Amino acid sequence: MAFAAFSLCLVALAVVLLLVRRWPWCSCHVCRAYLTGSWSKDFTNLGDWYAHLLRESPTGTVHVHVLGCTVTANPANVEYMLKTNFDNFPKGKTFAALLGDLLGGGIFNVDGDAWRHQRKMASLELGSVAVRSYAFKIIAQELESRLMPLLAGAAGSGEVVDLQDVFRRFSFDTICKISFGLDPGCLEKEMPMSKLADAFDTATRLCAMRGAAASPLLWKMKRLLNVGSERELRNAIKLVDELAAAMIRERRKLGVANSHDLLSRFMASAGDVDVDDKYLRDIVVSFLLAGRDTVSSALTTLFMLLSKNPAVEAAMRAEADGDEGSTPVITYEHLKGLHYTHAVLYENMRMFPPVQFDSKFCAAADVLPDGTYVSGSARVMYHPYAMGRMPSIWGADHGVFRPERWLTGAGGTFVPESLYRYPVFQAGLRVCLGKELAITEMKAVAVAVVRAFDVEVVGESGSAACAPKFVSGLTASVSGGLPVRIRRARNN
């Protein structure tokens, strides 16, 4: 009883300190809107509100004082943070604390030598021709043996399916095969839900809630007392740890020699150095975060947009079938030549990036190129979701889904934008190493599905005027899923 009373007093003190520090001394409309949630009266998502604030700002930068955060959609600031003065904008100890329970010492959660070492190893492996060939073979097999038969069954029965759930299962199967050489079978006929996938979903959602809290005292106190969301998070991470350990044991039992999966190659590349299970566990979780949710998020919003833009879908189908309608086999080389499809993918992620924002912490007081002063240890967030909605970057038609904006090369070929104007895959020294693999997987799925099926989004998500509502998380997922009706394409 004494301990409980003491704990309640600490919680009460934390709330009082929060109110004293945040509410009375910051009466600006931005902070009040954030704390009260009044922004939701006019905007579907928090990201839409940020985009509005950043469009209204002359510099494309705003302060959210209650979070101790500077938010920017200014490409010059992004380049300064991710390239010019990279060392002064690390992930930081605060970020490591937010995600440390889940990501541990993985590449997405560390700085300095630990980050450089992991990045060097990952770059060598992901840049390997053998790994890329191995990965594409797995993607093609998963498409042919599981995804396409599942969608064909749905087309035959006329049932409504949650396409977001289907893509999450597909990407979970493929990333587990590519990264660990193991098959969870989430897209089998009985659609089993992997315990690891379920626990991982819970952990990422609750970690994101930590970052959105007005004060870290709140979640740290709940963690200390092991109550509420922090107790749920602890249980989820415990399960992730147990299943990751089982994966590592299984991989060791099967052996790593002559294996092309990434975990085996990481084990083998260590040579005679004994790599401990904690290090390997953090690699497992990092691969899952990088390769599962991002791909499924992008594919979900892609088919949501295609359902509302049938002319774009028809153009993709025509390009994939070739000039003579010969329906060429989907190969890596064939996919590379699909410039319009490439543009569609990039335009989709411009409007709906899988990772809607990313944060750094300013190590020493600095001034951003737009003149914004940032104090030492302050959080600085660049916002790809808002950047995709900035007329200063994309013009007056920034709200229009128009793939042609990317086809500015000779003969209408795809030309990428500067990564500092389009930081969907990050940029600079932390640019995503799995970018090409992710694009290849998304292209393969998009081409295979568009060729064979017409996908109609049903319910509110299918309305041309309805903006999708996203669930809070480390990656964007559509609230309520994406219910669709599948039909055989008219030319099949």
Image (cartoon, rainbow, N blue to C red):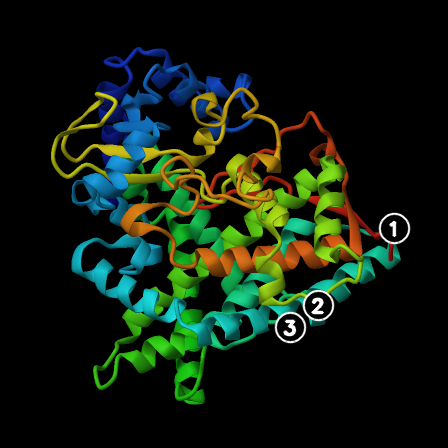
Image point (31%, 39%), residue name: 359
> Is residue 253 or residue 84 the one in the foreground?
84
Does 393 sit left or right of 340 as displayed? left
Nearer the observer: mark 1 or 3; the answer is 1
SS label for mark 1: loop
Q: How much space separates mark 3 and mark 2, taking CA atoms?
A: 13 Å
Q: Position of residue 172 (x, y in %)?
A: 55, 63
For residue 2, say whether it is visible: no
Amino acid type at circle 2 is: Val
Disc 1 marks which amino acid?
Answer: Arg
Task: Please count the marks in the image.
Answer: 3
User: Which residue position holds label 1?
Assistant: 490
Label 1 and label 2: CA atoms lie apart by 19 Å
Residue ID at (17%, 45%)? 87
**Which class describes the residues within 10 Å of circle 3: few (<14), some (14-19), or many (20+)?**
few
> Quarter of the image holding residue 264?
bottom left
Residue at which label 2 appears: 329
Q: Secondary structure at mark 3?
A: helix
Q: Which residue is mark 3?
A: 141
Amino acid type, callout 3: Gln
